[in-house]
């Protein structure tokens, strides 16, 4: 007679067969190890803040728990977010918002990630489950009408095996801009988040930007285990740290996506995510990047091409002023790599108001 396979503790917890604390004990040692990594990153970022003249809030807008296909509890996720020094965390379980009561108890925010046509939808700020239709663009519009913030997670797929088809990637061209899209997704990664699917996402981002669309970048862990929370995050330049201010700043593109470096790109009073009119070209771009552990390289990308490269060789700060040539027609953005390979991406400054969609 065949023996029945033993049920994994996390599956038993979902079915109510064991209490969540049994699952928590199973993951105690790996969680402690992961906690050391993100606590070290938190110290690194705090030191970098002294080199970076803008106030920002760090947070993750995409993670999962036992309420869907994750293997940790809401409490474990909240504890890891605090250890990582994050200012906010959205728990975006699939299939609804059953995690909401626990989120309120733990001081984290509720999101959700339903599957939709061609892509998943990351939804922030709705207190009820959203049921997608077979029309991705209509679903995004519906979320916005309901007062939610919506983003496209992992637009090219996720590590290690999921790569989206060309049809799924091309569906992004049907969406009304502006919209938010992940360019770093940490699914199934530990310690660092960036992998080949993120390289594909960045290339896709540049293609969308070159078409004249305004696409604001995000970096989220997509953690299905609390271990990964804190390996990538959004630096949000918001006036306050409440949920409304954070979501508003994200929607405006006033943020950067990062594993460690801090980035900002401005032109006079024009911020990341804003449009720069033709008349505003008299103001140069000002690039600022900081990492207390040392920068390897910073690049300025404009209209899909690397226009400037600065080799820092471990210097902690890069500050550059760049005149805007008339030939640059669409956008400019920054990307940085630290000495240990960790990456960061600024949101674009969009060029020529009348030529940019959305």
Image (spheres, helix red, strand yellow):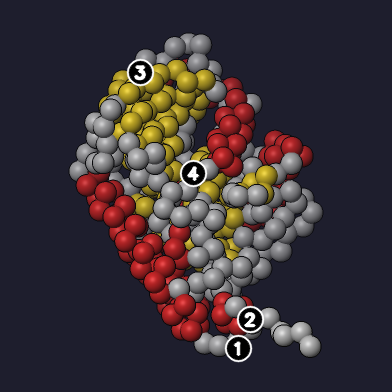
**Circle 2 crowding by C-alpha within 10 Å: few under 14, some 14–19, many from 20:** few
Residue 340 visible from this viewpoint: yes
Q: Which residue is at 53% across, 49% downward?
A: 185
Front position among marks 3 and 4: 4
Label number found at residue 322: 3
Cβ–Cβ under 8 Å for marks 1 and 2? yes
Q: CA distance from mark 3 to mark 4?
A: 28 Å
Q: Residue at x 34, y 37 (%)?
A: 338
Badge nearest the viewer, 3 or 2: 2
The reply to whether residue 91 is in sight is no
Can you identify the residue that label 1 sits on? 17
Label number found at residue 194 = 4
Counting residues from the N terminus, which is met first, the one under dot 4 or under dot 2? 2
- Mark 1 secondary-structure assignment: loop
Q: CA distance from mark 1 to mark 2?
A: 10 Å
Q: Neighbour class for label 3 at 10 Å: few (<14), some, many (≥20)?
A: few
Mark 2 highlights which residue? 7
76 is higher (above) or lower (below) than 217: below
> Which part of the image, by quadrant, shows the N terminus?
bottom right
Residue 312 in the image: state x and y as whole percent: 29, 26
Between the residue at mark 3 and the residue at mark 1, the CA separation in whole angstroms equals 61 Å
Which of discs 3 and 1 lies nearer the camera? The answer is: 1
């Amino acid at each position: 007679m065949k023996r029945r396979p033993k049920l994994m503790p996390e599956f038993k917890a979902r079915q109510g067969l064991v209490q969540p604390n049994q699952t928590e004990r199973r993951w105690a040692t790996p969680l402690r190890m992961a906690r050391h990594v993100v606590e070290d990153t938190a110290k690194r970022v705090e030191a970098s803040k002294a080199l970076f003249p803008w106030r920002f809030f760090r947070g993750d807008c995409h993670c999962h728990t036992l309420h869907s296909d994750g293997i940790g509890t809401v409490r474990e996720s909240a504890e890891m977010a605090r250890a990582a020094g994050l200012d906010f965390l959205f728990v975006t379980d699939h299939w609804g918002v059953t995690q909401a009561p626990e989120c309120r108890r733990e001081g984290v925010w509720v999101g959700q990630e339903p599957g939709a046509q061609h892509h998943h939808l990351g939804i922030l700020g709705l207190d009820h489950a959203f049921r997608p239709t077979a029309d991705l663009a209509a679903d995004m519009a519906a979320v916005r009408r309901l007062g939610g913030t919506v983003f496209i997670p992992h637009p090219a797929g996720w590590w290690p095996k999921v790569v989206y088809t060309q049809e799924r990637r091309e569906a992004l061209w049907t969406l009304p801009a502006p919209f938010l899209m992940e360019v770093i997704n940490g699914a199934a990664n530990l310690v660092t988040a960036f992998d080949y699917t993120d390289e594909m996402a960045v290339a896709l981002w540049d293609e969308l930007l070159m078409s004249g669309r305004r696409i604001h970048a995000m970096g989220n862990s997509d953690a299905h285990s609390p271990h990964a929370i804190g390996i990538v995050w959004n630096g949000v330049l918001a006036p306050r740290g409440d949920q409304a201010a954070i979501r508003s700043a994200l929607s405006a593109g006033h943020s950067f996506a990062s594993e460690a470096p801090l980035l900002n790109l401005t032109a006079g009073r024009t911020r990341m995510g804003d449009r720069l009119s033709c008349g505003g070209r008299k103001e140069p771009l000002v690039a600022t990047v900081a990492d207390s552990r040392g920068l390897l390289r910073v690049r300025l990308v404009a209209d899909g091409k690397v226009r400037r490269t600065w080799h820092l060789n471990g210097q902690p700060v890069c500050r550059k002023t760049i005149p805007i040539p008339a030939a640059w027609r669409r956008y400019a953005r920054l990307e940085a790599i630290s000495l240990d390979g960790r990456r960061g991406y600024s949101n674009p400054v969009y060029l020529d108001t009348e030529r940019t969609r959305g």
